[in-house]
Amino acid sequence: MNLHPTAIIDPRAQVPASCRIGPYCAIGPEVELGENCRLLSHVTIEGPAKIGSDNAFFPFCAIGMAPQDVTYRGEPTRLEIGHHNEIREYVTINRGTVKGGGVTRVGSHILIMAYTHIGHDCLIEDHAMLINGATIAGHVTVEEWAVVGALCPVHQFVRIGAHSYIGGGTTITQDVLPFSMTSAARDTHAYGINKVGLERRGFSSERIARIHHAYKILLASRMNTSQALAKLKSEADRGEDVDMLIRFIEASERGIIK
């Protein structure tokens, strides 16, 4: 492999010859790297961790470290990372805890920008984007294509809905609705749908119109959430996106940001 002489790889790690390991990197035992991974320099990865192919790790990121949880007692929990991710400078990603299921999971095609933290037992789904300094507490789910803005702290057990967009500097303590735009500049309210993001992902005008109609009922009518859900369920042509929105709200345990 392309291995810098200052790098340290534990003999119990699995590192394919196609990987490039730069200066002063450290790979611990029970770390399994996929093909064509690049560790630029000063990257530390601890295990147990299974990491897919074609991932890039930038300087000074710390991957697979023990969870920052006072109840953790050294149990062999895990980190799993998919493929084609870009993990930038000073990112920290922790392994899971026994009480949280034992695994932190990061999907594929995700951009994790500098200084982001992903806590124990999180699930980050495919194509998500975490902007510089996003701070994701333990047990958080970030669904596919969601964008968490710069310097956003996200409370533990919160869910960030698919295709949503959170503006920079927004503190998130409740679930963020799918397709929504949420910002501290709007008093941490959902103030509309992420139309630009949906268009970029190939949503048709008809799909976007159905989502927009659902949001008018949820956010702009005088109905409470239960009444709005009943109204949406009564509409036969609501579509699969609105069905997903309904399921998300009904499954919420922390409440939703409206």
Image (spheres, helix red, strand yellow):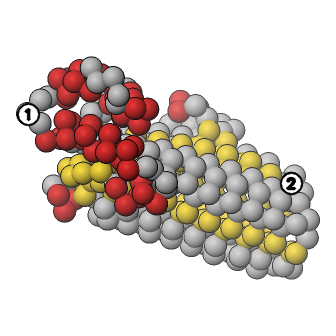
> Residue at image x 81%, y 72%?
20
Mark number displayed over residue 148: none
Q: Answer left or right for 159 relative to 220.
A: right
Q: Position of residue 89 (x, y in %)?
A: 56, 73
- The residue that label 1 is drawn on is 222
Residue 147: give x, y in percent of width and height: 42, 57
Furthest-left residue in view? 222
Image location of residue 8, percent across then percent down: 81, 69
Residue 46 placement, left or right of 183: right
Which three-letter amino acid code belongs to the residue tagged 2? Gln
User: Measured along the vertical axis of the image, is residue 25 above or below residue 189?
Assistant: below
Query: What residue do we see at 17% from left, 23% from top?
Result: 227
Quadrant holding the N terminus: bottom right
Note whether residue 109 is visible. yes
Q: Which SS class for mark 1?
A: loop
Residue closer to the observer: 147 or 157: 147
Mark 1 neighbour density, 10 Å: few (under 14) some (14–19) many (20 or more): few
Q: Quadrant of residue 206?
A: top left
Q: Secondary structure at mark 2?
A: loop
Q: Which residue is mark 2?
A: 14
Q: How many marks?
A: 2
